[in-house]
Image (tube, rainbow, N blue to C red):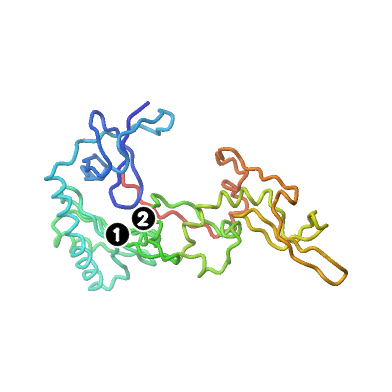
């Protein structure tokens, strides 16, 4: 068993795991850790806990120290610099007529480096822009092109449901989302109905997909013939949340009626996989059909 802590460098994004050593952290504490960019300030989102060695991949980096009030103050100063830095960088890009949109800026803990995130339809030659930015901000400059999903995660907003975008409040990583998931849930395939603010398929399609994929395995197919207490009929619709089926039963040669039945009344026993481990039975790893689906790429940067 090893003791770990989970930290985030932003309010949203990946959770990284470090070895706290003898330090004890509570949720919300600040921590100073060593990354590929040098020392960085991060917030603890998962306090000290023990996990099995088999669940840890590679060697955990140690936490350097707990953040002091001075560290926290320095971090907040860097945060306050970001809005003006974004405006200045965008003005420099516009002056050079570069087709790019500066989305966010991030200063290293010691202020020696600034990373600017931008979106663009094509590759941008920003060599002259970097020189001017380095002279203006007096630090090393890195420009990083990101995808539209990352832009949505950084800036946030309200989704079609009226709630804050999942990628900005609860999703720590981008999962694969495909049209197949919308089909499982019987949703309209109209792109405007199943797309989020970023214009890509909504991340929430992934949340309940496993349940729908499992339920579809034992629910009767549409227009299939089933035996009901009122005689044979054809399936008109299914409700996978309430596990009921509407069946059209012929009452006479010219008339029919639609009745709702439970699975028990139809002689169907729901069977779910115990502890799904991604065997492919629920379609989770079924890549054959997804090859032709609209699968969203993962626009994610690795901080470490």
Residue 197 location, x and y as percent? 42, 66
User: How many residues crowd around disc 1 within 10 Å: few (fewer than 14), some, or many (20 or more)?
Assistant: many
Residue pictured at 79% horizontal, 54% vertical: 229
Q: Could you say which quadrant of the image residue 190 lies in?
A: bottom right
The residue at the point 64 percent across, 58 percent down is 239
Q: Nearer the viewer, residue 203 or 135?
A: 203
Is 107 on the left-hand or right-hand side of 227?
left
Q: Residue furthest right?
A: 253
In-front residue for pair 46/301: 46
Q: Residue furthest top?
A: 1
Q: Which comes sooner in the sequence, label 1 or label 2?
A: 1
Up-down relation of residue 108 to residue 150 (above or below): above
Give the residue furthest to the left. Answer: 70
- Is 285 on the left-hand or right-hand side of 66? right
Residue at image mark 1: 117
Secondary element at image label 2 = helix
Residue 154 image position (x, y, % from top left)? 32, 59
Q: Using the numbered discs, state the Cα–Cα distance from disc 1 to disc 2 in whole angstroms.
A: 20 Å
Q: Nearer the viewer, residue 220 or 251?
A: 251
Residue 290 occupies which quadrant of the picture?
bottom right
Residue at 27% across, 60% down = 104
**Tag 2 residue:** 169
């Amino acid at each position: 068993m090893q003791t770990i802590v989970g930290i985030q460098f932003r309010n949203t994004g990946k959770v990284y795991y470090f070895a706290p050593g003898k330090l004890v952290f509570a949720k919300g504490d600040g921590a100073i850790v060593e990354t590929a960019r040098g020392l960085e300030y991060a917030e603890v989102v998962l306090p000290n806990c023990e996990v099995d060695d088999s669940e840890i991949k590679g060697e955990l980096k140690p936490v350097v120290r707990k953040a002091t009030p001075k560290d926290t103050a320095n971090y907040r100063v860097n945060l306050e610099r970001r809005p003006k830095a974004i405006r200045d960088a965008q003005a420099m890009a516009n002056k050079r007529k570069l087709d790019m949109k500066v989305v966010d800026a991030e200063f290293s803990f010691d202020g020696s480096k600034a990373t600017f995130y931008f979106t663009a339809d094509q590759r941008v030659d920003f060599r002259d822009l970097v020189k001017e930015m380095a002279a203006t901000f007096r630090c090393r400059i890195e420009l990083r092109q990101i995808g539209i999903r990352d832009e949505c995660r950084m800036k946030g907003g309200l989704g079609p449901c009226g709630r804050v975008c999942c990628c900005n409040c609860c999703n720590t990583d981008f999962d694969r989302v495909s049209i197949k998931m919308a089909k499982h849930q019987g949703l309209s395939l109209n792109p405007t109905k199943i797309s989020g603010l970023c214009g890509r398929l909504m991340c929430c399609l992934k949340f309940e997909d496993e349940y729908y994929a499992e339920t579809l395995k034992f629910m009767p197919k549409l227009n299939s013939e089933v035996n009901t207490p009122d005689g044979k009929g054809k399936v008109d619709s299914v409700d996978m949340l309430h596990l009921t089926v509407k069946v059209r039963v012929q009452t006479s040669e010219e008339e029919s009626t639609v009745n709702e039945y439970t699975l028990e009344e139809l002689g169907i026993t729901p069977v779910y996989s115990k502890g799904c481990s991604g065997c492919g039975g629920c379609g989770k790893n079924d890549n054959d059909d997804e090859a032709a689906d609209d699968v969203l790429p993962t626009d994610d940067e690795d901080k470490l």
